[in-house]
Image: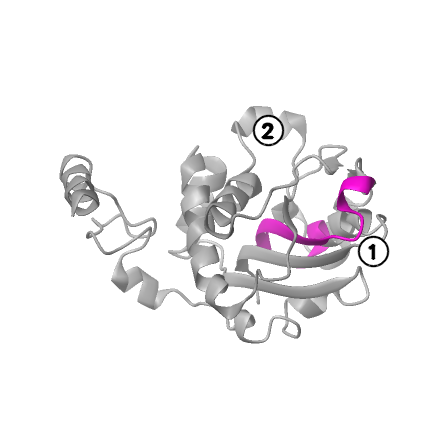
């Protein structure tokens, strides 16, 4: 009752807003209002995480176990507002809220049961300084809040600054753009571990492939992938 009272009082003083439409959330809603949540085109990947169109992007690229994403992403769609706000509008805490919702959706299926640790896709120091945070790290924090999995954010680093993947027109350009972009710096820490790579949006999978191949240099590593959105078109 006390929690309900303080939650209701806080909502009265500073109403929480839907991350998509901006409408006021009621006490039973988190991040999205019921209408936007119902309209969100969620992927079915968690129903078959070992074999789906996203997981197939990584077959033969590194030792992939499973892959999933929360929803299908389309640029300039209403749901894309969440991603823009997270990446470009300084709303770092939004990433944690998104991560929590992704975790709550996937946890009942046992998706996290055999995962040892979370690895957010790293960004360069320059981009970290410009943005003030790493959006994938924020999402990883939210997932960790629910799953209690540790975050390994210092086992691989981004070596150089590349153009945004959104500026690349095809899969080949995206892969060339991130070629040798990552460096494994602590192989001993991840030896024999099953790691969950976290990214915001997966399109061709080029960034994750580049990072995953570097992580796979550690002995006995297995990798899974989880993202906010997946671009299917």
Tag 2 and tag 1, C-beta contact below 8 Å: no
Q: Residues within 10 Å of mark 1 (few under 14, many from 20)?
A: few
Return the mark for residue 164.
none
In magenta stretch: residue 160: no
Mark 2 vs mark 1, foreground winner is 1
* Residue at position x 38%, y 64% in the image: 40
Q: Position of residue 187 (x, y in %)?
A: 82, 41
Question: Residue sitting at 82 percent across and 41 percent down?
Answer: 188
In the image, is 220 to the left or to the right of 85?
Answer: right
> Which of the two discs, 2 and 1, labels the residue nearer the N terminus?
2
**Residue 169 on image: x %, y %:** 67, 54
Indicate the position of residue 12 as horizontal and vertical percent values: 13, 40
Q: Is residue 112 above or below residue 131?
A: below
Q: Residue at x 73, y 38 (%)?
A: 155
Q: Which residues are magenta?
A: 188-208
Q: Which of 131 and 60 lies nearest the eye of the viewer? A: 60
How many angstroms separate mark 2 from mark 1 (CA)?
A: 30 Å
Regarding residue 99, the answer to whether it shows in the image is: yes
Q: In the drawing, does residue 11 fall left or right of residue 159?
A: left
Query: Can you tell which quarter of the image residue 89 is in?
Result: top left
Residue 26, above or below 2: below
The disc placed on residue 220 is: 1
Magenta stretch: residue 189 in it?
Answer: yes
Residue 6 left/right relative to 33: left
Residue annotated with mark 2: 128
For the residue labelled by badge 2, is the local secondary structure a helix, a strand or a loop? Answer: helix
């Amino acid at each position: 009752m006390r929690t309900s009272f303080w939650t209701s009082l806080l909502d009265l003083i500073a109403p929480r807003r839907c991350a998509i439409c901006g409408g006021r959330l009621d006490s039973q809603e988190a991040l999205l209002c019921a209408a936007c949540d119902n309209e969100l085109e969620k992927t079915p990947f968690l129903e078959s995480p070992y074999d789906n169109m996203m997981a197939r992007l990584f077959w033969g690229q590194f030792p992939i176990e499973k892959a999933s994403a929360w929803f299908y992403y389309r640029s300039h769609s209403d749901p894309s507002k969440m991603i823009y706000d997270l990446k470009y509008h300084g709303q770092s805490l939004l990433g944690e809220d998104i991560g929590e919702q992704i975790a709550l959706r996937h946890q009942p299926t046992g998706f996290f049961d055999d995962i040892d640790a979370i690895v957010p896709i790293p960004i360069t120091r320059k981009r970290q300084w410009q943005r003030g945070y790493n959006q994938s790290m924020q999402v990883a924090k939210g997932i960790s809040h629910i799953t209690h999995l540790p975050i390994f954010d210092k086992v691989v680093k981004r070596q150089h600054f590349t153009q945004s993947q959104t500026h690349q027109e095809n899969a080949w350009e995206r892969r060339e753009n991130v070629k040798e972009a990552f460096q494994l710096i602590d192989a001993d820490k991840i030896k024999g571990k099953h790691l969950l790579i976290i990214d915001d949006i997966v399109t061709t999978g080029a960034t994750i492939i580049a990072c995953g191949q570097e992580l796979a240099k550690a002995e006995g590593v297995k990798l899974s992938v989880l993202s906010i959105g997946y671009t299917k078109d």
